[in-house]
Image (cartoon, coloured by chain):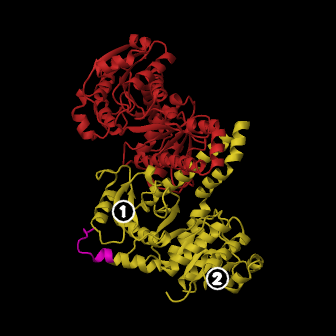
Chain colours: A red, B yellow
Amino acid sequence: MTGAPRIAIDAMGGDEGIATMMDGVARARRAHDGISFLLVGDEAQIKAGLARHPNLTAASDILHVEGVVESDEKPSAAIRRSARTSMGRAIDAVKRGEAQAAVSSGNTGAMMAMAKLALRTMPGIERPALAALLPSLGETDVVMLDLGANTECDTENLVQFAVMGAAYARIGLGIKRPRVRLLNIGTEAMKGKDMIRDAAAILRDAPHLPMAFQGFIEGDQIARGEVDVVVSDGFSGNIALKTAEGTARFVTDLLRRSFTSSFRSKAGFLLSRPALHMLRHHLDPNNHNGAVFLGLNGIVVKSHGGADEIGVANAVDLAVRLAEQDLLRRIASDLDQFHAAPARAAS
Amino acid sequence: MTGAPRIAIDAMGGDEGIATMMDGVARARRAHDGISFLLVGDEAQIKAGLARHPNLTAASDILHVEGVVESDEKPSAAIRRSARTSMGRAIDAVKRGEAQAAVSSGNTGAMMAMAKLALRTMPGIERPALAALLPSLGETDVVMLDLGANTECDTENLVQFAVMGAAYARIGLGIKRPRVRLLNIGTEAMKGKDMIRDAAAILRDAPHLPMAFQGFIEGDQIARGEVDVVVSDGFSGNIALKTAEGTARFVTDLLRRSFTSSFRSKAGFLLSRPALHMLRHHLDPNNHNGAVFLGLNGIVVKSHGGADEIGVANAVDLAVRLAEQDLLRRIASDLDQFHAAPARAAS
């Protein structure tokens, strides 16, 4: 692309309010010279949120839209009034080429539905996937997809998710040749469902792709730091993501209970505070913010609903990098390369 | 059943060796008057392990078998030499009525294959399921099934898993009317796969069953203490179980890293030891030991491979209770009740 990108921001989507969204966007702007913003939502509230940020104000246009997608609104209802909502108009700006990426902290299902309808899937991609970043013991986060955009998937979908996830990891994690694995219930070649074994056979047969395909991975290995991209159907991926979130909360809840169980433990807790702060920092979703709908003709980043200033800044930063480094062109060229290679087994 | 049960023990299966197995069995015996054991494996080693336990020795017969199923042995290979292995002979004792339950800490896949072949599924049960206990924030553990016995499942399988899981929870957790939910990627009625929605419709229509069916549950709610039985196909269940195990280890690894990051943190760690011990105790698999293959004509309990004395004792204790309270009859009568009810939708 030419010049610094412009990012469309759904100012209304976050649980923390517009001021937090503006603080986060302003923080991201400071890290990227030249980028500009289209801030979509209630003009008066946006202006109030901008008051503390003259530099962001100078880099932004405001698009006044009154409607807001509710957090519990059904996707089918939301898409009918898409053009009257801040989320729908932010995505629409990407479709029109008025912005190179859109960021929203709103309703995930509605966002997926709107983005699919407005941007359509890329040529050759059957289904888009939702990819997110998970913490790990390794140097970087882990990209995981699909996290629920597709309840049922086939072999071809999984192969395309692997290609798209690797392209995302090259930009999002800065890894030249990401290690890619398929989520399965065992690591031996004969384990799991046919569609997963077939996808593995196809990916093993495509060594020319810019990824290191390393077979299967089980749920207990996702966070060990030995994989960069974990690929699964949307049902299993959503189960794994939610179970990981729930278990992390369960363990930290137990830890809190334990620490308040006696005076001695409370004293130990106070002394251990910096250590526990490190733990909280590592698990904080704000430090792994930015899920992306891959496979669409446009970049749409989903920020956590409860994202704070840092979280919003991370999501916007990701959107900028994906636009600057042209995620869509990378995916398209990887897919071309994949389909062109003579060695590849017919799928 | 009449009289105290006899439990067949695969003495060779555990990673911790025969002595630990014998210590665990002896501990379980002390809690249950009158039960007896059939100890299957290398006679000399078993006798050495029994040396410290005269009461257990008096309550036990030894069946000398030289062969051992290896932990990495393929199920297909293991079943061919089943009759020459300690695991196979322990299961065989249940088949012949020489024992009312079998316990092994060995290879799960081999155990499933041998148990299916030897004991066959109960009348009316299409597929057996592997059920295990998971820690939770609630008063009791959570029963989860299937954990990998069946890669692909249909509606009827899920319904039967719910009935079997509830029967297991009534005995294993001592809950009169267990709260049962189906694992899904959302809680609204229209979410997820057809087979799950159909299973939910059938279970909602069967209020006469001794369970409280409460619809769907997402992965992040499993450990919150608000459900007693979580039902899923074997693929998703295995992914959820492994992801939960991996995440718990991930968080505790991070905690350890954090605590060793500075002198102050180390001091806090020492002071907090009792609290951290509580946490470890709550998460320790030995305190949630005893997975069961449900739906077979016999009770087979899978103990963790790395179970210690307490873990083995818990698995044996579970086997005794399942035998004493006649799990198989309960499942059969629940299934009869389920099929007899006129209100039930045809499946």
Task: Write down the region rendered in magenta.
Answer: B337-347
Q: Tell me which residue sits at (26%, 28%) in the image.
A: A85
Residue at the spot of label 2: B38
Q: Which mark is residue B154?
A: 1
Mark 2 crowdedness (10 Å alpha carbons): few <14, some 14-19, many ≥20? many
The chain containing the residue under callout 2 comes to: B
Instruction: Judge by depth and name the residue closer to the eye, B137 or A183.
Output: B137
| Residue B222 horizontal/vertical position (percent) | 45, 55
Q: Is residue A153 visible?
A: yes
* B338 drawn magenta: yes
Q: Return the x and y of residue A111 as percentages of the image width and height.
A: 33, 34
Which residue lies at the image location 39% right of the left edge and 47% below the top edge?
A153
Dot 2: what SS? strand
Tell me if residue A213 comes above or below residue B129 in the rendering.
above
Tags 2 and 1 touching, CB below 8 Å: no
Q: Which one is nearer the viewer's eye here, A259 or B249?
A: A259
> Mark on residue A94?
none
Q: Identify which amino acid the numbered label 2 is placed on.
A: Leu
Q: How crowded is mark 1: few (under 14 residues within 10 Å), some or many (20 or more)?
A: few
N-terminal of the two: label 2 or label 1?
2
Compared with A254, B162 (above or below) is below
Q: Is residue B329 magenta?
A: no
Work out whether B317 lies above or below A254. below
State which quarter of the image contains the C terminus of chain A.
Answer: top left
Q: In this view, does A129 lie to the left or right of B32?
A: left
Residue type at mark 1 is: Asp
Establish if B160 lies above or below A275.
below
**Viewer-nearest residue: B137 or B207:** B137
Is the magenta region chiefly helix, strand or loop? loop
Where is residue B334 shown, x and y percent of the image?
37, 76
